[in-house]
Image: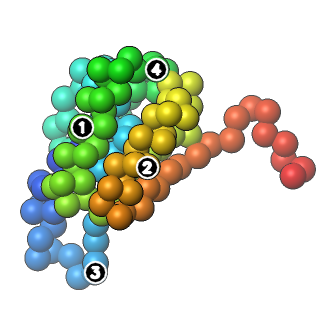
Amino acid sequence: MGCGGQQVDHWYSSREGKLYANYGIGSPHEMARAVVLDGFKPKYGDAPDMPESRKNFGWSMTKPDLEQANKIMEIIDQGRQAGAISVASTVGYMRDGVSARELFEIVKVAAAYNRPCSMHFRAGHTWNRSC
């Protein structure tokens, strides 16, 4: 489910009857942050938007205020209501902007629907390779 997709209903309808396997998409934490913190407007709502959504750095570096954080959660929740099967976070790419509280809140969104929350992590420069 990787980075997920912002326009969940469009993602499903564009694949209906074309895939021969079970499929699903996560409601994306990263894209919700880009929409709120950078004013990004998704064209496709999933992976093809990612390069454009990363042209500014608010999505990865900004700690949202309470109003912004609530809007991020609202967007993630809208994706879940539209049929996303999880909440998807690429927190490893935005660790300077995401607080523990924000992660707790996205897990709560997933839990409200009894769904998983998938997270992609990255090791920092201080990672000890001998562990």
- Separation (CA) of disc 4 from disc 3: 39 Å
User: Quick check: 99 left or right of 125?
Assistant: left
Which is in the foreground here, disc 3 or disc 2?
2
Distance from Cα at disc 2 to Cα at disc 4 = 18 Å
Indicate the amino acid at tag 3.
Answer: Ala
Side of 18 where 80 appears, left or right: right
Pick whichever, 14 or 38, lies toward us. 38
Q: Secondary structure at mark 3?
A: loop
Helix, strand or loop for disc 2: helix
Q: Earlier in the sequence, mark 2 or mark 4?
A: 4
Say which quarter of the image contains residue 75: top left
Q: CA distance from mark 2 to mark 1?
A: 13 Å
Contact (Cβ within 8 Å) of mark 2 with mark 1? no
Name the N-terminal-most of marks 3 and 2. Answer: 3
Which of the labelled discs sits on residue 63, or is there none? 4
Q: Which mark is residue 107?
A: 2
The amino acid type, in three-letter code, at marker 4 is: Lys
